[in-house]
C-alpha cells in the first residue's frame, strides 16, 4: 500500500473516531453532567431526562457507539484492503 | 433445605466447575500462559472481560452506593462504562495489532527504553496490588457470611481456588473460567432484580420498571418528606465540577487499567478486539443498567418497610433480624417515641444501613427461595474471584515477562519463562492473601489510587504512542513521572495528611483527570524540544495504523457487494 492510501485510510479512521467520541462526550459529559439541570425539566417515562441519561441512557448509547465503530471499521478495512 | 446448605452446595459446585475448566485449559508454552494463544473468540473474550472488570465492588457495593447517593452515584455508572468507549476506539485494536504480551511491553518497545518499561511495570504492579487486596477481603467476607467460617478461612479457601486455575492454566485457564463466572454472576444479579421489580411494579424488566413505574417519583416525595434531597436531584453531595472530574478520571482510568487492556491481547485479531470491546460493554451494561433499578427499588422498599414502624413490627421481618445480627443493619429508638425513624443526619437517624447489604439482602427482602439467596452468594464470589485472577496474572506477567525475560534473561527458554510466570502467580497470591487476612486500614482509601494512577500514567502514554508519531522517549517518561507524582502527591496529601482539596475543591477521586492533563502537556512539550523517535519506531507506528493484512472472512464480503 502506498503512503497516500495509507494516509487516506488513517484519515477516515480518525474522522470516524472523532465523530463517535463527540457523541460520547455530548451524551455523558454534556447531557448527563453539564446540562443535567435544564434537561431534568423534560420527562422520559416517569424520570427526569437528565437523570435517566446519567443512570441508564448513556450506558446504552456507549454500547451502540462501540458496535457502530466496529462495523464501520470493517467497511473501511475492506475498502482499503480490496484495492491494494 | 436451609440457605446455608444451599450456599454450600452451589458454591462447591461452581468451584468444581472452575477447577475443571482450569484443568482442561492447562498450558505449557508462554504464549498460552500469558495471552491464551491469542485464540479467544470475541464474544467469549467479551464475557471474560466483563467478569474480569466487574469486581466484588461492582456486584455487592455499587447498587448500595447509588442508593445512598441518588443522582451523584451516576459517576460510577457512567465513569466505569464510558471508559470502554475510549478503550475500544483509541487503544484496544492498536494494542492487539502490536501483539505482544503486556502493557509495559508496548510502553517499553514504543518508547525504545527499559526505563519506560520499568516505570510501566511498577505502575502496573501497584495498580493491580491495590485492587487485588480488596478483592481477597471481599471473598473472605462473602464466605464468612454464607458458610459460617471465619473471614481468614474464607480468604484461604479463595487463595487455593484462584491459585489452582491461575497457576495451571495461566491466561487460557483464567479466560474460560471467567466466562463461566460471568454467566453465574449475571444470573445471580438478574434473578432478584427481576423479582423485586415484579413485586413492586408488576413489570419484570428492571430497566423498564425503573423508567416507567411510579416508584422513583414516590421515592422523591418520601425523601423530601423525611428531609432528604430528592433522589433524582443532581449535585446533592458533590459539586458539578467534582462530578465532571471524577467521571473523567474513572473513564480514563478504566481505559488504562492493565488487567482490562491485557484481555484484548488474547483475541485473534484487531478486528476481533473491536467487537470484543463491544461485547464486553454489552455484558457489563446488563448489570450496570440493572444496578440503578435495584438501587432505587431497594431504597424505596427499605424506607417503606422500616420507617415509622414499631420495634415489634420490625422484629417480625425475618430478613431484618437476620441482618441485624451481622451489625450491618441497626435500629435504635433514640428519641424513645416507640417508632423507628429514618433521618438525613447519622446523629438523628434511628436506622443504620450499611450500603453493602442492599444487593445481598434484596432476595431475602423479596422473599425469594433459599436457592436464589445461595446463588447470589455464588455470584458475589464469582465476581471477586474472576477479578482477583485477572489481576494476579497481570502482576505475574509484569514480573515474569517484562522484568525477567525482557530485562534480566532474554535467553530464557519457553519452559523457564512459564515456570517463572507460575512461581510469580504463587507469590502474588500469597501477598494478596496476606492483605486479605490483615487488611491495611487504608484499602478503601487507596482504590482512588488505582484509577487516578492509571489515568495519569498509562492512558496518555499509550494514546500518544499510537496517535502522535512525534512523541518520543524523553516526552513519555517525563509525562508519566509528572502525572504520577502530581496525582500521588494530591491523593496522599488529602487522604492521609489532612490537606484540603485545593484544586477548585476537586476530591482525590477526580484528581487523576488533572494528572492526565499534566501528563499530556508535559509529554507533548518535551517531545517537541527533544530529538524525534528513531526511524524504525516511526515505522512501527505506521504499521499499527495501516489496515489489517488479513482479508475479512468470506461471510462479510457478501455484505460488501450489496453496497
Image (cartoon, coloured by chain):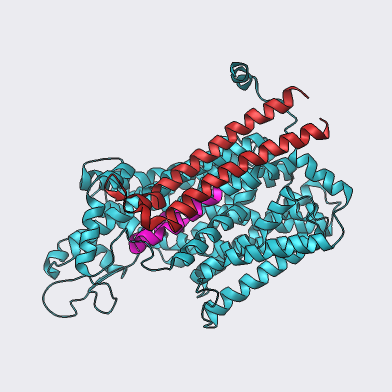
Chain colours: A red, B cyan
Residue B183: image location, x then y, percent: 45, 41
Residue B513 vs residue B552, the one in the foreground: B513
Q: Is residue B494 above or below residue B117?
A: below
Report if residue B245 lies within the magenta region: no
The magenta span reads B55-84
Total count of labels: 0
Q: Nearer the viewer, residue B42 or B453?
A: B453
The answer to which of B512 and B144 lies nearer the viewer is B512
Front-lying residue, B407 or A66 = A66
Residue B195: x and y in percent read: 27, 45
- Whether residue B487 sits left or right of residue A5 in the image: it is left
Q: Residue at x 61, y 60 (%)?
A: B455
Q: Quadrant of residue B59?
A: bottom left
Question: Is residue B73 located in the magenta-colored stretch of the structure?
Answer: yes
Residue at 78% over, 50% down: B469
* Quarter of the picture holding the C terminus of chain B: top right
Secondary structure mainly formed by the magenta segment = helix
Q: Is residue B386 visible from the viewing direction of this image?
A: no
The quarter holding residue B39 reads top right
Q: Is residue A70 above or below residue B470?
A: above
User: Is residue B474 visible to the viewer in this orientation of the structure?
Assistant: yes
| Residue B329 percent coordinates (x, y) | 28, 68
- Is B345 located above or below residue B559 in the figure? below
Left or right: B434, with B123 as reference point: left
Q: Residue at x 54, y 78 (%)?
A: B502
Residue B409 horizontal/vertical position (percent): 84, 56
Amino acid at each position: 500500500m502506498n503512503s497516500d492510501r495509507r494516509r487516506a485510510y488513517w484519515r477516515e479512521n480518525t474522522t470516524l473516531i472523532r465523530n463517535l467520541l463527540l457523541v460520547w462526550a455530548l451524551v455523558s459529559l454534556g447531557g448527563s453532567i453539564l446540562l443535567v439541570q435544564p434537561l431534568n425539566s423534560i420527562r422520559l417515562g416517569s424520570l427526569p431526562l437528565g437523570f435517566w441519561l446519567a443512570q441508564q441512557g448513556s450506558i446504552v448509547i456507549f454500547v451502540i457507539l462501540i458496535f457502530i465503530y466496529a462495523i464501520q471499521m470493517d467497511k473501511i478495512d475492506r475498502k482499503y484492503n480490496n484495492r491494494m | 433445605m436451609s440457605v446455608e446448605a444451599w450456599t454450600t452446595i452451589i458454591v462447591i459446585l461452581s468451584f468444581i466447575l472452575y477447577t475443571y475448566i482450569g484443568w482442561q485449559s492447562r498450558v505449557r508454552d508462554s504464549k498460552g500462559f500469558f495471552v491464551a494463544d491469542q485464540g479467544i473468540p470475541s464474544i467469549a473474550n467479551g464475557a471474560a472481560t466483563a467478569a474480569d472488570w466487574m469486581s466484588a465492588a461492582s456486584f455487592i457495593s455499587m447498587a448500595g452506593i447509588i442508593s445512598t447517593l441518588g443522582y451523584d452515584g451516576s459517576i460510577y455508572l457512567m465513569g466505569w462504562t464510558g471508559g470502554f468507549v475510549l478503550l475500544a476506539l483509541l487503544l484496544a485494536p492498536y494494542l492487539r495489532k502490536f501483539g505482544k504480551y503486556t502493557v509495559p511491553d508496548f510502553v517499553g518497545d514504543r518508547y525504545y527504553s527499559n526505563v519506560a518499561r520499568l516505570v510501566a511495570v511498577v505502575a502496573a504492579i501497584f495498580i493491580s496490588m491495590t485492587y487485588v487486596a480488596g478483592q481477597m477481603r471481599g471473598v473472605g467476607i462473602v464466605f464468612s457470611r454464607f458458610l459460617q467460617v471465619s473471614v481468614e478461612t474464607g480468604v484461604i479457601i479463595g487463595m487455593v481456588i484462584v491459585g489452582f486455575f491461575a497457576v495451571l492454566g495461566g491466561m487460557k485457564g483464567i479466560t474460560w473460567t471467567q466466562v463461566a463466572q460471568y454467566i453465574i454472576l449475571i444470573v445471580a444479579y438478574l434473578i432478584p432484580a427481576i423479582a423485586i421489580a415484579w413485586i413492586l411494579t408488576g413489570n419484570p424488566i428492571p430497566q423498564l420498571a425503573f423508567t416507567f413505574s411510579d416508584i422513583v417519583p414516590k421515592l422523591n416525595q418520601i425523601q423530601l418528606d423525611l428531609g432528604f434531597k430528592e433522589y433524582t436531584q443532581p449535585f446533592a453531595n458533590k459539586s458539578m465540577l467534582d462530578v465532571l472530574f471524577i467521571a473523567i478520571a474513572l473513564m480514563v482510568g478504566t481505559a488504562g487499567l492493565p488487567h482490562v487492556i491485557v484481555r484484548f491481547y488474547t483475541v485473534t485479531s484487531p478486528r476481533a478486539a473491536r467487537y470484543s470491546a463491544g461485547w464486553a460493554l454489552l455484558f457489563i451494561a446488563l448489570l450496570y443498567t440493572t444496578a440503578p433499578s435495584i438501587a432505587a427499588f431497594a431504597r424505596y422498599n427499605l424506607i417503606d418497610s422500616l420507617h415509622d414502624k414499631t420495634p415489634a413490627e420490625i422484629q417480625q421481618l425475618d430478613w431484618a433480624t437476620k441482618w441485624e445480627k451481622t451489625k450491618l443493619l441497626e435500629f435504635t429508638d433514640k428519641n424513645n417515641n416507640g417508632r423507628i425513624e429514618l433521618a438525613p443526619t447519622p446523629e438523628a437517624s434511628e436506622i443504620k444501613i450499611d450500603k453493602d447489604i442492599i444487593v445481598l439482602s434484596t432476595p431475602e427482602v423479596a422473599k425469594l427461595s433459599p436457592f436464589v439467596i445461595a446463588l447470589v452468594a455464588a455470584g458475589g464470589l464469582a465476581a471477586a474471584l474472576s477479578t482477583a485472577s485477572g489481576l494476579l496474572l497481570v502482576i505475574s506477567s509484569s514480573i515474569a515477562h517484562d522484568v525477567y525475560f525482557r530485562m534480566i534473561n532474554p535467553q530464557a527458554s519457553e519452559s523457564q519463562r512459564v515456570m517463572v510466570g507460575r512461581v510469580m502467580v504463587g507469590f502474588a497470591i500469597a501477598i494478596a492473601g496476606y492483605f486479605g487476612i490483615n487488611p491495611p486500614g487504608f484499602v478503601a482509601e487507596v482504590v482512588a489510587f488505582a484509577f487516578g494512577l492509571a489515568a495519569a500514567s498509562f492512558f496518555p502514554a499509550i494514546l500518544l504512542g499510537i496517535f502522535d508519531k512525534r512523541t518520543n522517549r524523553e516526552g513519555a517518561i517525563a509525562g508519566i513521572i509528572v502525572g504520577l507524582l502530581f496525582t500521588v502527591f494530591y491523593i496522599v496529601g488529602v487522604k492521609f495528611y489532612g490537606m484540603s482539596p485545593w484544586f477548585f475543591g476537586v476530591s482525590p477521586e477526580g484528581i487523576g483527570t488533572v494528572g492526565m492533563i499534566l501528563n499530556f502537556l508535559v509529554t507533548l512539550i518535551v517531545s517537541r524540544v527533544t530529538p524525534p523517535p528513531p526511524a524504525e519506531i516511526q515505522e512501527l507506528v505506521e504499521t499499527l495504523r495501516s489496515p489489517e493484512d488479513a482479508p475479512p472472512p468470506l461471510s462479510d464480503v457478501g455484505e460488501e457487494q450489496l453496497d
